[in-house]
Image: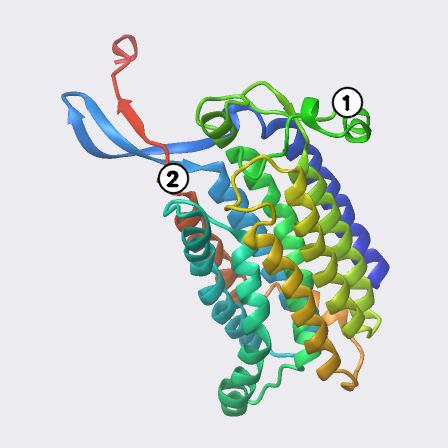
């Protein structure tokens, strides 16, 4: 498989997925996926736990990101077991950090922050790679080339974060300012193209009362920009320019995080400049320093066709399925909404 063909397939899939998400997900129908009864509240009635589209779409994003990580590092002939170990170790740090950092910054126990989790990931990733090389890598005979591995992680994150914005559209979080309050150029640019969320359970409704109001489609802009960044950085990676790919993916995603928050209306912590914006800028500086220190690493060429073929091994498929389920159960069990359920028999069908 050529790099062009690989990127073309990804591009078509992204266009279709984004078109669907941007069209339907702001609607009320696309927030609660299912409700599961857990305890009785009255005769014939149950309290339920809501399973959300946010969780499903987040799980999709994680699996796409990890799959891309498998492909990029597999193209460098790194064994799948080493890639899986890296992914599990990184997720074991970043997924809990998404809730912990939100609690520290926003003082909320039932929310997530991708920005905080990414900053933690940027800081720990170089050290984690070195640790794995000296421990599991030595024991099992694999080596993670530090700069190429950092580039693959940054690219995978770019795709995962872009796709993850669809989860935010479904939940109605990370929303933009009302179009009526936006600068004139943005009002003209997005006239008729803003998101209009509906439903009392959307965060934009209960936090800001913007149900039915056209707002800047910040989530969509982020999704498209990050996907384009991932495509360009992937092309650079496969061409052997891993340092440029790493810096490009990190700089675009984190600097846009800084800029995009100026267009958002949701609460991001106290102060004109949020802690997440500061984290984004620091992350770019840190990544630039890591790229400089790890430069001039040898390049053996990429075996893209072999990496894609290796995805169809049973162990890899089961790993990705287990990852999807774990993320869905972690992110998809709503703690800010509830359900009251009742059931009945269709007597005419008995």
> For residue 306, what is the image quadrant?
bottom right
Q: CA distance from mark 1 to mark 2?
A: 33 Å
**Quarter of the picture holding the N terminus:** bottom right
Residue at the disc numbered 2: 334
Residue at (58, 50) in percent of width and height: 61
Label 1 Cα crowd, 10 Å radius (few <14 / some 14-19 / many 20+): some
Residue at (47, 30) in percent of width and height: 207
Depth order, front residue of 105/125: 105
> For residue 110, what is the image quadrant?
top left
Asked if residue 272 lies left or right of residue 292, the reply is: left
Disc 1 to disc 2: CB gap under 8 Å: no
State the residue lying farthest toward the left.
43
- Is 1 located above or below residue 50 in the figure? below
Residue 82: x and y in percent read 55, 78
The colour scheme applied to this rendered structure is rainbow
Asked if residue 210 lies left or right of residue 329, the reply is: right
- Is 66 located above or below residue 79 in the figure? above
Q: Is residue 1 visible?
A: no
What's the mark number on residue 138? none
Residue at the disc numbered 1: 191
SS at circle 1: loop
Judged by depth in the image, the label closer to the viewer, 1 or 2, is 1
Q: Is residue 317 visible?
A: yes
Residue 185: x and y in percent read 82, 30
- Is 138 located above or below residue 4 in the figure? below
Residue 249: x and y in percent read 73, 61
SS at circle 2: loop
Depth order, front residue of 212/141: 212
- Is 71 located above or below residue 335 in the figure? below
């Amino acid at each position: 498989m050529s790099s062009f063909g690989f990127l073309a397939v990804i591009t078509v899939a992204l266009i279709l997925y984004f078109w669907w998400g941007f069209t339907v997900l702001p609607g009320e129908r696309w927030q609660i996926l299912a409700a599961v009864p857990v305890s009785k509240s009255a005769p014939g009635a149950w309290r339920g736990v809501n399973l959300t589209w946010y969780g499903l779409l987040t799980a999709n994003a994680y699996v796409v990101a990890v799959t891309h990580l498998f492909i990029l590092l597999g193209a460098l002939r790194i064994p799948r077991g080493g890639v899986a170990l890296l992914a599990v170790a990184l997720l074991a740090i970043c997924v809990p950090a998404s809730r912990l950092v939100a609690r520290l910054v926003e003082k909320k126990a039932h929310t997530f922050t991708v920005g905080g989790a990414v900053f933690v990931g940027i800081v720990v990733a170089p050290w984690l790679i070195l640790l794995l090389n000296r421990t599991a890598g030595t024991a099992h005979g694999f080596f993670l080339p530090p700069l190429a591995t950092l580039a693959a992680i940054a690219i995978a994150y770019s795709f995962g974060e872009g796709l993850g914005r669809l989860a935010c559209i479904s939940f109605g979080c990370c929303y933009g300012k009302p179009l009526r309050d936006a600068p004139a150029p943005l009002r003209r640019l997005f006239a008729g193209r803003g998101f209009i969320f509906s439903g009392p359970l959307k965060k934009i409704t209960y936090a800001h009362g913007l149900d039915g109001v056209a707002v800047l489609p910040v989530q969509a802009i982020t999704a498209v920009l990050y996907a384009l960044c991932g495509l360009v950085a992937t092309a650079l990676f496969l061409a052997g320019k891993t340092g440029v790919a790493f810096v490009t993916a990190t700089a675009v995603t984190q600097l846009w995080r800084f800029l995009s928050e100026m267009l958002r209306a949701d609460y991001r912590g106290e102060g004109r400049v949020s802690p997440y914006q500061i984290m984004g800028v620091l992350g770019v500086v840190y990544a630039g320093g890591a790229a400089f220190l790890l430069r001039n690493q040898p390049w053996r060429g990429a075996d893209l066709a072999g990496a894609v073929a290796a995805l169809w091994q049973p162990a890899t498929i089961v790993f990705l399925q287990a990852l999807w389920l774990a993320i869905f159960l972690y992110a998809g069990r709503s703690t800010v909404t509830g359900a009251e359920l009742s059931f009945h028999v269709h007597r005419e069908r008995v």
